[in-house]
Amino acid sequence: MRRPLVLAALLALFLPSPVSAQWLSLRSDHFQLVGNVGEGDLRNVALRFEQFRDVIGVLNPALLDGSSAQPVVILVFKDKSSYTPFMPVENGAIVPVGGFFQSGQDVNYITLMLDGTGQGFPVIFHEFSHLLLRSVFADAPLWFNEGLAEYYSTFEVPSSRRADIGKPSVRHLRLLQSRRLPFARFFAIDRHSPEYTKDSTDRNLLYAQSWAVVHHAFHGESKRRDQLLAFVTKVADGESTEESFRAAYGIEMAALEREVQAYVQQLSHQFTMFNFKEDLVRRIESRASRISDAEADAWLGDLLAHMRRDEEAAVRLERALAADSGLALAHASLGALQIRQGKTAEGMAHLKEAQTLGTGNEMTYFLYASQLAFEPEREQLQQAAQALQRAIALRPGYTEAKLLLGFVHMELGEYATARDLLLPMVRAERTNHRAALWLGEALLALNDLAAARSVLGPVVARATDPSEKERARTLLIRSAQLQARNDAAAAPQGSQPPAVTDPATKVSRTMNPEFRRLGEGERRDAGVFEAIECGPQGMVFVVRTAETRLRTRAARFEDVEFLTYRTLGSTGVTCGAQVPAMDVYLTWRPPPEGSKTTEGTTVAIELLPEGFAPAR
Ligand SMILES: [Zn+2]
């Protein structure tokens, strides 16, 4: 592989060096800022961001709620020439922007240029809105994301207790009074469309019209806010634009187009003034500090790595480390990049070094652990566990790290520890089926079968991922088998006590998924469990199937195998009508031929998981 090296060397030659610039670093309550601007400018940016965050947080507490939110690093460039190398690139060409938002799993970058024209701040809020709103509308169409970001971009704080949101954009209005993009085309524009990637009037028009559609929905007279949100939600769910539009608005697209056109011709437009009881953030307490050129290179290299410009990133990161081998950030970033490129050994060495240097980047620990978690040696597993604990300490809401740690504990045979880690996750987040599966497995290993069933039942019922469903089913079967073994051991004639901590109780993940296996001469029918008629001669189980009402006998409850795949709390089965009537599999033996009775013998009742559709 000679070419990348040559290319890297060439890039290094032409790389703009940060040597001439003064780079400053500043930490505010919620942001890390790095810039080649003066301290006053850097503090101003920090203040505006804190205020904006404050206001959005008051208006939408849910947006900012979440300890899992990644840190935000704001890189501030003083002019176009220093910013150009970090502008986004599309189809090999630089997309000229005033600011850009780059998301990442470990950190979010916002880059922006302060060019003295005052254009910078709308760009700031535009980009920050993208970050805040990302969690709300993950797959929203481009025009909506841009329109909403433009809507918030005119944010102002005229006094310490007032914020103005949604002020009309004179620039957009002026453009829209003479030009427009036909709606059918406009709604189809995506990240690769020429209207977005080319610096042209159409691009300005795209932003202006996106803004107008949102502003009209929020402040126009026709109250189209809910319809717009319904429309966007449907499109984000993957439905076609035309169908989503029809379903959400119930009018022709041309009708909305006319409304919005009339709206932009109005002489005045409303906005929202929020008055707060408490002062908004008023000043930034911390001071900026000078950072070395090597450290600036590390930040810039990490930004490029997040933009997936690996060649340029590697050159910068290596240059940073050549100048200062003590930069944890550069080690962490280069290590992650190399692992992504398949250079595992080199990458692991850098990640290890970053940890030794005390990096605060939780992804570094997670990545490091991910490489070790699947190794067979105990020592490596223990190292993985340590690294993951560190990652979780740095970001308490780090779900992926917790799941992986649960897995590592299981591999180490530390089932109780795995349970204690996973149980709060499953309780807090009912749809986290992966956590539930690991928890179920830990509970099985701990021989807590009832708890395991209560955790696994809902996964069978609700998981949309077939492999998750299947694994939950497999584990439930295993729980039934363990139950049978426990019961046999508890019976007086039982000889073998269950080997609770025996590694053999660990579930084979390749077992075929199915419910209780049918024995010879047994029949199984799916139906609704209506009643148990109890009497002096024993009991009759009544199950209504699609065709008939089955009645099967048993002398005692103990003669019937009860298996439940439901959540706890709905499993009490006693004599009388069954309320609520549950879906079951009834396993029974037909009466011997020539026998007088028509009633068979009850073998097993399996309570099916909620929502489970049995095969008929
Ligand atoms: Zn944008």
Image (spheres, rainbow, N blue to C red):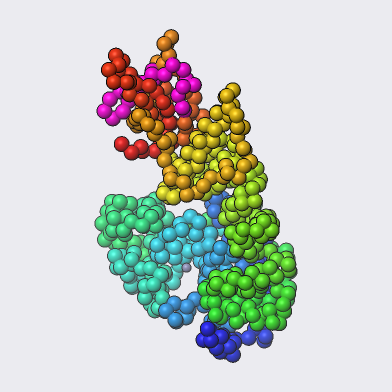
Most foreground residue, 175 or 438: 438
Q: Is residue 399 magenta?
A: no
Please name the residue shown 57% across and 55% down the image: 400
Residue 23 makes an appearance in the image: no
Q: Is residue 553 magenta?
A: yes
477 relative position to 323: left or right: left
**Number of residue marks:** 0
**Residue extending farthest top:** 536
Residue 527 picture quarter = top left
Residue 379 picture quarter = bottom right
Residue 455 makes an appearance in the image: yes
Location of the C terminus (image quadrant): top left
Please name the residue shown 56% across and 85% down the image: 5
In this rendering, the answer to whether 139 lies above or below 100 is: above
In this rendering, the answer to whether 255 lies above or below 590 is: below
Most foreground residue, 301 or 82: 301
Most foreground residue, 252 or 507: 507
Most foreground residue, 427 or 37: 427
In this rendering, the answer to whether 523 lies above or below 230 is: above
- Measured from the top left, where is residue 170 in percent x and y? 44, 69
Please name the residue shown 36% across and 38% down the image: 613
- Measured from the top left, where is residue 403 in percent x and y? 58, 52
254 relative position to 490: left or right: left
Please name the residue shown 45% across and 24% down the image: 560
- Measured from the top left, where is residue 594 in percent x and y? 27, 17
- What span is colored magenta in the figure? 540-562
- Measured from the top left, where is residue 164 in percent x and y? 53, 59
